[in-house]
Amino acid sequence: MSLVTRYAPSPTGPLHIGGARTALYCWALARRHAGRFLLRFEDTDRARSTRESELAVLEALEWLGIEHDEVPGFAGIPRQSERAARYAGIVGELLERGRAYRCTATPEELEGMREAARAEGRKRVYDGRNRDAGIPADVGAPFCVRLRVPDSGPETRWTDLIAGASGEAPEDIDDFVIARTDGSAVYHLAVVVDDHDMGVTHVVRGREHLSSTPRQLLLYQALGWEPPAFAHVPLLVGASGKKLSKREGDVSVQAYRDRGFPAEAMVNYLARLGWSHGDLEIFERRTLVELFSLEGVGRAPAQVDEAKLAWVSQQHLKRMPAEELAAAVQPFLDAEAGEPVAIGERLRAGLDLLRERSETLADMARQARFLYVDELEYEPKAARKFLKPPAAPLLRDAGAALGGLDSWDRAAIEAALGGVVDAHQVKLGKLAQPLRVAVTGRGASPGIYETLEALGRDRTLARIEAAAARAETVPSD
Ligand code: GLU
């Protein structure tokens, strides 16, 4: 039997990194075992669920490369809001088979039961008063439907594939409501019916759903269905150690994308928030698929760590294939320039130089600015320090030497600049620093020869000329 996992978000907002991590684990497990990874929208909260959120979730998953499979027997991605009739049918079946019964207890009666349970220190609240009353559908009073929960038996316990031995004593569980007085099925029933109908073999989900599992297992038993395996992923916590919240800033996947973290880096970082394999820290999606196992997921809450994310991101920027890097950085270049930027051979070489020095794609685009804008802006501090009168003759001579080159490559550039510093009897830094500010506008950049090579002859010469003119005109201090 092939392994089937699912991710079942409630589409009430963007996809947060906690949900993305759960989806990633579901996906990796399915891919690892050549199984299927399915998606379903749990949109029973009609007031808060929107199509816009569905699209945001899909877009975030697509960006991360977590692609889902089609659900056999369903047209498109199942939505709970479209399955009310199926749930009602299952409730009817349970009633018919005596596994469920109608209950007309009023809110006042229930309050009385709650008080009695409290006084006696019992967890079970409902006293079973309508269990055997045989209340018919046409009773003429509002009724809900309750599941007949056995007093004993092993169904409410399971071995969680992450959390280990889990469960509750059946005698602590009420005959819980499976259909409300308006006839609508409750969430637990919908989840069980959906997972069954979708053929899910492994339910991998957030730790917050652990306490729902005993009730869901009771439903599997009542329906005579084989329950799936369960694996509850520990919580994600913020830097403070508390549940991830707004305090950590925007933790939606889209926000990380917009800040310029490459998708591969995000996948790597999210996977490592809870999963480990030896001392493996940096890996691509395909390696995750080769190595992922639920045994590798720890039981302790995982803490988000921005510094770690920045480091992981930098490692990916260093190793990304050139084509992929160009595609990923393109929107950031366009945004920085305020117009579409063509990535030619030169710019590509320049981006290569910046791999070592960038933590995000946005960071890389900012640092690469000198390579694709016509008008350079000098960093005020760098200009003040290096574009001063004594630098002018050095810059002018460098311009002349570079202007006379037959070929524009690193070796020729190095030789030309070497000639200039020799003639002036100065160290390379005396020329390289003003030159760096002249061509990049900044006080720091990759090696000067490579930088000039990537920038190209025309822009280099024009910028040296402009910088020399400026250096000549500022008063000496
Ligand atoms: N819809 C639930 C959520 O968004 C998931 C429930 C489940 O995975 O069983 O957290």
Image (spheres, rainbow, N blue to C red):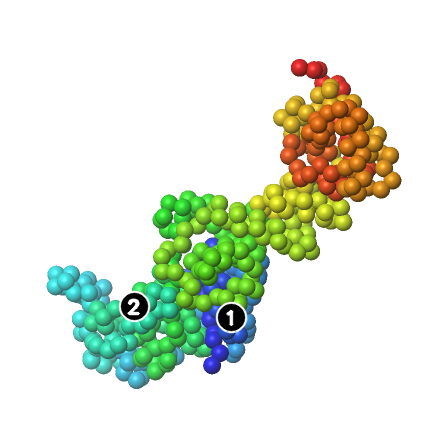
Judging by the rendered image, the residue that carries numbered circle 1 is 32
State whether residue 477 is above or below residue 323: above
Circle 2 crowding by C-alpha within 10 Å: few under 14, some 14–19, many from 20: some
Please tell me which residue is depicted at 19% across the width and 65% down the height of the picture: 123
Is residue 140 visible to us here?
no
**Amino acid beneath label 1:** Arg
Please tell me which residue is depicted at 42% across the width and 64% down the height of the picture: 296
Image coordinates of residue 241 in percent, x first then y, are 36, 48
**Amino acid beneath label 2:** Ser
Instruction: Look at the numbered disc 1 and say if its residue's Cβ is closer than 8 Å to ligand 1.
Output: no
Quarter of the image where one finds residue 218: bottom left
State whether residue 231 is above or below residue 196: above
Is residue 165 visible to us here?
yes
Looking at the picture, tell me which residue is in the foreground, 449 or 213.
Answer: 449
Judging by the rendered image, the residue that carries numbered circle 2 is 166
Image coordinates of residue 427 in percent, x first then y, are 71, 27
Looking at the picture, tell me which residue is in the foreground, 338 or 378.
Answer: 378
State whether residue 419 is above or below residue 55: above
Please tell me which residue is depicted at 67% across the width and 50% down the height of the picture: 330
* Contact between labelled residues 2 and 1, with CB atoms less than 8 Å apart: no
Side of 19 where 366 appears, left or right: right
Side of 394 where 191 appears, left or right: left
Image coordinates of residue 211 in percent, x first then y, are 31, 64
Marker disc for residue 81: none
